[in-house]
Amino acid sequence: MLDIIFAELIIAAIITFFVGKKIASIIAGFISILPLFALIDWANNFGFKTISFGIERQMNISVAGITLHLGITPLSWFFALMILPLFPLIMLYSYSFFKENDGFYPFMLFAFASTFGILLSKDMLSLFLFWEIMSWSSFLLVYRSRDKEAIISYLIFSVFSAFAILFGLMILWHENFSLLLSDIGRINGIYGFIAIASLIIGFSVKSVLMPLHAWAPFVYSKSDEPFVAFLSGGLSKLGYYGMFLFLFTLNGVKILQNYTPNVAWNYLLAVVGSLSAFVATMLAIMQDDLRKLLAYSSIGQLGYIAIGFGIGTPLAITGALFQAFNHAFFKAVLFLAAGAVAYRTGKWKISELGGLAYRMPLTFLAALFAIFALAAIPITSGFAAKWLLYEAAIQQKYVFIAPLMLIAGVGAFLYSFRILYGVFLGENRYPDVKEAPKSMIAAMFILMLPLIIFVVFPGYMLDLMKPALSNSGIESIAHTKFAIETSLAKYNSMAVLITLIAAMVPAFIIYKARKHRITSFEDNYLAGEPYEFHNPSMHAAHNFYKPLKGVVLPYFEPGATYYFEKIYKGIGILSNGIRRIYTGFVQDYAIYVVIFLLAVMGWLIWM
Amino acid sequence: MDVMGIAIKVALLTAYAVIGTCVGLLFMGIGRKIIARVHNRVGPPFYQNFIDVAKLLSKKTNISHGWIFDLALLFSISGILLTLLFLPIGGVQLLSMEGDAFLVLYLLAIPALGFALGAGASGNPNAGVGVMRALVMMLSYELPFIITLIALMIYYDTTSLATIVRMQSINGVKSWAITMPPFMLAAFAADMALQGMLMEQPFDIPVAPHEIASGPMVEFGGKYLGSLMLYKAIALVAETTLFVDLFLGGGVVAHGNFAFVINFIVWLALIFLLFILSILIAASFPRFRIEQAFGFYWKYEAIIAAISLIWVYILVIK
Amino acid sequence: MVVHPVLLIAIPLIAAFIIPLAKKYGFAIAAGAMAFNMGYAIGMFSYIYSHGKIYEMIAGFKPPVGIFLAVDALSAMLALLINLFAFINFIAIGKEWNYKFSMLYLLAIAGSTGIVLTGDIFNMFIFFEITAVASYALIAGKKDEKAIEGAIKYMVLGSIASIFILMGIALIYSQLKTLNIYDIAARISSMDEKIKWASFALLLTGIGVEAEIFPLNGWVPAAYQGASSGVASLLSFGPSKAAIYAIARIMMVIFPFHATYEIALYVGVVTLVIGELAAFMQEDVKRMLAYSSIGQMGLILIAFSLASQNIQNALIAAFFLIISHASAKSSLFLLSRSPSMGGAACKYTGIVGVLSIIGMPPLAGFWGKWYLMLAAINEKLWLVIMLVFFAGIVEAGYFARYLHKSMGNESKLNLRYKVAMVVMVSFTILLGLLPIAYKMASLPLWGW
């Protein structure tokens, strides 16, 4: 069955090269549901009673003389649960997003199939193989953007990440002489250390951890929205999947500690994560391009997952996985909503948008809800995740990380409101815009469901990740259906929700007690200035956080991108220098030949 | 929990919601009076705010700008009541065992966000600018506040406000956090943050009546403005109570019979004092510019808070 | 069935001499000869695939006059590759030129095939000469300034190279009185130490010029830039592959010493890094591809040089790298005729070619790099691994720039070009995907 699922994904990818857009999206959407059946089936393995379709848990494929070992593990099951459902919905969304099929669907399907493959990999070769397939298929999707920075930076960083991962895997292979991940024994000493460090660096490219995030603002802001939703929501989690796999399931933390008992390397990861969260949030506040804002927001929100892994206590890891799960959905919704806005208006700059909430109310609602989740407002499941991470930081008394995390959380309000106000509220600039097409709305609303389910029942989420945690020897934290309890405090989502509904009652009474009249927005108090005076724009969204910009931005200049550009230019200078060797004079070349001969001869004879 | 228990709990919560609202409105009236006196005016009577709210809520002309505008009304009152009920007040835990300080921080964002949504939906540029200022202020004062909060949390090894209050009330006033030198610094920083939270001068930048026509409130009238006044009143109580819970033992001084009454009175006195302090500061300082306020909080206040945090950290890890 | 590998050399040579007599049918004769060659190479390969290697001595003459052919799996593979691609390439470009071109093309192919098939170093020298002379003329065939410049540079260096090769052979012959590589290999220990090393240095330098290794590759950028795209394509799958194979053969059969492998490794690494770095800022597409070829030749040389310890992995790596480079680079050179990659065929050819060279699965280049890494890590060559990675990242940088720059909606290529390109580049996909490639690569390659 499993091989059939893979084969169908690949065949669908090839078919979608040749068919029209609508058929392609239907094929892609339906084919990509198949792995979800497998997920439901596999849930039986991990203590959940579900339907069984008889899909095997293990499978071996022979490719080029090497056997690929595929199979489901509790960890990959949990990650699959957050990544794979995105895909059919994104396909549903793309049903009306694209005008024609010009190479989007096949590569999306390749990316999806390889994601599935990465999650199922049980040996290094298949992990790396699928990782690379994922890299190039996503690169080809980036390539569609036709943006120079995006294309170059994405390919360079992908290759860098692939090589770092390959390097780590190779060392592990060399020490164990087995490609199976489960055979990775205790590698101590420098080799184990380098292997794990190199793997973490490799994975942190895809999980956009600073300072290896430099590609993300370009790529996220220039590629097609449905792809970016999958990139940010789904593919970025693969980096964290890899980190979790090697750090906790395969005992990477212990390998690191055995080499340097006195250095807490995981603390370093937490610091990097918190700086990532903080700096990216601050930069997100300053953006005017909606997609760049969301890109930096992704970097920031994904930083929290790294913090969780860095702190490394059960509490923190639970929080990190919860955050990963939430992020997959709310960021997908946000990117899709941004895409819907652009689909209708054709504008990306926040300062050029405005007033769409009444024109596109459903899109607005989806975006609003996703923003609640992003800003961790306790009426979505976004809060529980952040709460767990905060608790973990306080529990470990990490006094450097905790304030950064919390202030980044506050910063999230700022850029959230930037989106809400700049795009959806304020002056009604697009009176003729219609609501986004139905398939887009449907996709966004279905994607919101997990956020709602797990705010009411945060305990269920903890149940879902329990197999993954216990498989890695991490105990799961005390919880009931509605409440999570730590050694420091308790969070009862039901109490919050019920009280909020109850507190709505007086508000609603006040609201209903007197009638109101709805006026157009031109009927505003403008301190005596006529409305025409403000034409063409009464929208205050241009350069929104200007006071903050002058104060904050200088501290973040120059950014990581600057240094990467420096490196790029440095290599360029090196390259130009080396090209001088090729002087263009054949006499010089002849001399080189003679020198080479003498050198080789000398080396061989006298060495 | 039986039905009776739930009924009692609901009654208690309702009572505290009402008390909180009334205390808030009363304080606001007193505040106006005091400011007037400082300015050498007579000022309105102390119950003026009750009259204002009643008048506004019963107005017949109410102008809305659509359903998102109405969210301001719905979310501001419900959100702030929710926050209030998750705080221990005068030794009464209310719902504070069901959440903790982080939850309160985020619950405080619900009414603010609802308010901001409504303000934004009005389409008035002044409202947009006002909300922007409010959010920047929030970013500013939250940093020192968060750092002091973390100092307290790692000292008491809990994030629960109820536990913090309980641990501070073991020996009455002597065990209040503010009696310890590191927390004196922290309390100073937190009080400055409170000034910002209450949007009193010199940090009333978001409303700044003379610059941006009351900012976010510019389009609110009738029941909308009335609900916002209620929000402001309850927020005043909630925020000062948060401070009292963190540094002043929640006002808990007595145990045993009648402790409830005594603690309630102490709590009331403490939040009143805090409020008066803030009003006096407000009456004596002119408004900051937004960058100045940001710099003030992120440089001086944050450093003070950080010193206290490091101090506490050293105490704790010893 | 008895296979005569010599036909692979003889037929194109004969055809080349017939062409001037029947100028009108130049294209047809050449195409026919190449089609025959392709078919015969396939047949020979399948024979060797099932029966093992072939030695053939041309009757009646003894070396050095006669021709001794020693065909093992890898040389059969390379002969197949060269002839197959030559046919595809020739069909695409042959009609644009007159009969002289066809003749020269046939000579170059015959020479290249000869280099990989021969088991006699003097014959190897002769084939090098044939290939080189044909290549000079082919490059100069475009008749503009750049083409002439490239041809002259190639010619000067090529002449020096042939002198060196000849001197190397002479040194060996003076000591051992034989030219058969197996004879030499058997008696290499009886050679004077210094002369042995001197002859290796001379051969490496001489063949290295053809194999584009640093610093002997001064002619490469100019020649590739000057040559028409079809000829550049030919150069990248024909002579250069034959030459790198010749180095490998000489090194592994005659001089299988630690020092020689070490030298090859260093030279390979330097060539790789210099080539990739030089390509990094190159704006001219053909020149960039030429530098990139230099880098790839370095990579192949590294793979061969690792064969001393890990013969299995190293040779599989070399096999896949040669396949990947030949198929990807030749199609990219064909593509470089048009400044932009319009249309699906051009676009995906460019993309697949680039991805294969960068080493993305399931393309052949991936397996090349994977096995290369396996071989390298076994010997703990950390610095080499790091440099290969660095070169890979640099490669990604300029290829991404190339892909971006050549993005476009128009294509100047005609259908024949497109078909040739697609067919060539599909080999990197097919051989990466099909398990048979691995079997081919891991045949008992080296009979010696």
Image (cartoon, helix red, strand yellow):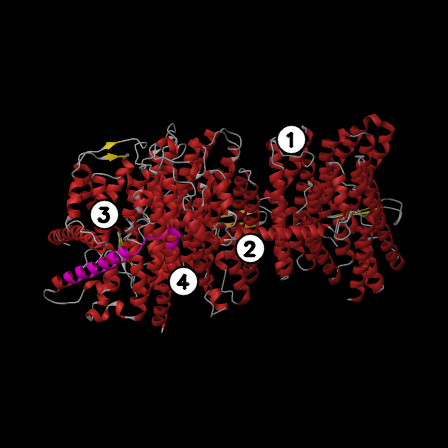
Q: In the rendered image, is residue A475 in sight?
A: no
Mark 1 and mark 2: Cα distance apart in space:
37 Å
Type of the residue with mark 3: Tyr
Which tag is nearer the camera, tag 2 or tag 4?
4
> Foreground residue, A477 or A362?
A362
Can you identify the residue that label 2 sits on? Answer: A164
The x, y position of residue C211, in whole percent, is 76, 49
Q: Which comes sooner in the sequence, label 2 or label 4?
A: 2
Mark 4 and mark 3: Cα distance apart in space:
34 Å
Residue displayed at 86% across by 34% down? C17
Q: Label 4 is found on which chain of the structure?
A: A
> Foreground residue, B264 or B294?
B294
Task: Give the dominant element type of the magenta stretch: helix, strand or loop.
Answer: helix
Q: Is residue A156 magenta?
A: no
Residue C411: mark: 1
| Stretch in magenta | B264-292
Type of the residue with mark 4: Phe
The x, y position of residue A514, in whole percent, is 17, 36
Do marks 2 and 3 both belong to one polypeptide chain? no
Q: From the viewer's perspective, is A266 left or right of B211?
A: right
In this view, B182 is above or below A221: below
